[in-house]
Amino acid sequence: MVVGTSGTSAADVVAVARDGARVALSPEALAALAHAREAVDALAAKPEPVYGVSTGFGALATRHIGPELRTQLQRNIVRSHAAGMGPRVEREVVRALMFLRLKTLCSGYTGVRPEVAQTVADVLNAGITPVVHEYGSLGCSGDLAPLSHCALALMGEGDAEGPDGTVRPAAELLAEHGITPVELREKEGLALLNGTDGMLGMLVMALADLDRLYTTADITAALTLEALLGTDRVLAPELHAVRPHPGQAASAANMAAVLAGSGLVGGHQDDAPRVQDAYSVRCAPQVAGAGRDTLAHARLVAERELAAAVDNPLVIDGRVESNGNFHGAPVAYVLDFVAIAVADLASIAERRTDRLLDKNRSHGLPPFLADDPGVDSGLMIAQYTQAALVSELKRLAVPSSADSIPSSAMQEDHVSMGWSAARKLRTAVDALARVLAVELYAATRAVELRAGLTPAPASAAVIAALRAAGVEGPGPDRVLAPDLALTTEFVRSGRPVEAAEQHTGPLA
């Protein structure tokens, strides 16, 4: 992965964070780094104080720092800001954070020396992951504590996880990989800390996961529609064209493709014919589609942030200018927005699952899809678990970005809480996968219980793939937790989409 002065993509972030892609600095980036550093060195030589170069930081910016203390100043800001607490955050989050900070360093607007950026790349390539803690960022002045713990490792201090997964002193890991710890000079400590990199990295990875999960939700909704003997007429393209939300059209098209050739839809083959299906079935494209459009907006914000150089101060045209580009509001808002959409998608999926299990609304299916109702409880408690997850998702949908808490002696008197929004979105994405897994587990069983009726080829392929993954079909009660765990992994891996696409072609 070659890092230049611009052009970093979401796919690049995922490749480095999750797949361990190696990183190299382009000649263009090295030249930009050197050019900006010349400006910083020139300003450092002047007697006038320059913020970030020859002053303290934040509320302490009024003190002019002499040349003899500036190395200590940069080292101290990293040490003092490495104040995180709580459990470690995930390896992929730290790698994304470091890669995105490297992206901004290489923009040529931060004023660090080329060797500082190269050290970040070397640490990533060595598979060294600094220990970063859950708490410590207010999402303003950047993700300060998380980035500080990363910068600490570059200095050969603090702890880090090695390629083997063992946490050890960072100095030992750097030495083993032949990496010389950096001795920070003017502005460099500050430049390593001032960025929205943590919240942006988590947004990018959440969007990658949700692309797959939203398509999976269309598949589970289609399977439920089949199992309930619903009608696919509501998926007709001309119905969705008169309300031209692109996400809605995409979800409806996905569901229609999955249901093509089904022997279970359209006839309402039961003793109580319906004019309409319930909202949770009939409105599935409208709800999932609104979520898709929410993801599209979040993706636009992420792309803009990926194109940004987020630091304070910035080196522009030979001068160093203070600014507020580190404020996380743009990212924080969409992190919260996406969490709302995720909660609603999970909510409608749970309502469909409940309908499958209720003999009064399932149109001929056995209560709780049990083998011998009364002796067997079937999937009763699987829906309880799903409901608990949905309730948790509703709590996670409460926005973090609506909050602010002053810090730094009221210098930083309005903050974004974007890191908190990102952390809860990660939890929400994980919960959504579990909720969809329960619907898939119930819907596949329900379709198989429709003896004598043939599901769509795409539906049958999804069912077959799930059974091949070790998840058993209908039968007497058994311990459900292992089946639900396997189904969750099946959903996370994208295999429902892969199986369906064998018959549908590419789904949106």
Image (tube, rainbow, N blue to C red):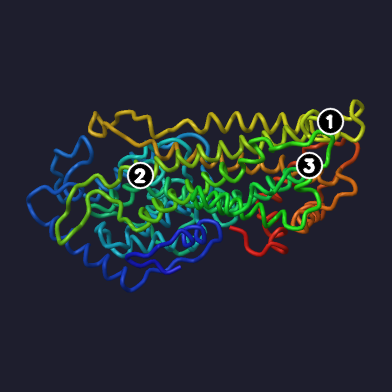
Q: Which mark is residue 330?
A: 2
Q: Residue at x 37, y 52 (%)?
A: 155
Q: Nearer the viewer, residue 249 or 111?
A: 249
Judging by the rendered image, the residue that carries numbered circle 1 is 367
Residue at image coords 8%, 55%: 46
Furthest toward the left, the residue is 47
Left or right: residue 89 versus residue 71 is right
Residue 173, position as x, y percentages in the image? 49, 56
What secondary structure is found at the residue carrying circle 1? helix
* 1 and 2 marks in contact (CB < 8 Å): no
Q: CA distance from mark 1 to mark 2?
A: 47 Å
The answer to whether any part of residue 130 appears in the image is no
Lower sequence index among marks 2 and 3: 3
Q: Residues within 10 Å of mark 1 (few under 14, many from 20)?
A: many
Per the model, the C-alpha gap separating discs 2 and 3 is 47 Å
Label 2 sits on a secondary structure element that is: helix
Residue closest to the eye, 334 or 406 = 334
Which of discs 3 and 1 lies nearer the camera? The answer is 3
The residue sitting at 76% across, 48% down in the picture is 265
Residues packed near mark 2 inside 10 Å, few (<14), some (14 to 19) or many (20 plus) = some
Instruction: Estimate the x, y position of residue 112 in percent, counting from the top left.
Output: 27, 59
- Is disc 3 in contact with disc 1, using a CB cutoff of under 8 Å? no
Q: Closest to the observer: 451 or 209?
A: 451
Amino acid type, residue under disc 3 in the picture: His
Quarter that holds the C terminus: bottom right
Q: Can you tell which of label 1 and label 2 is closer to the viewer?
A: 1
**Residue position marked by numbered label 3 in the rendering:** 268
The x, y position of residue 347, in whole percent, is 61, 34
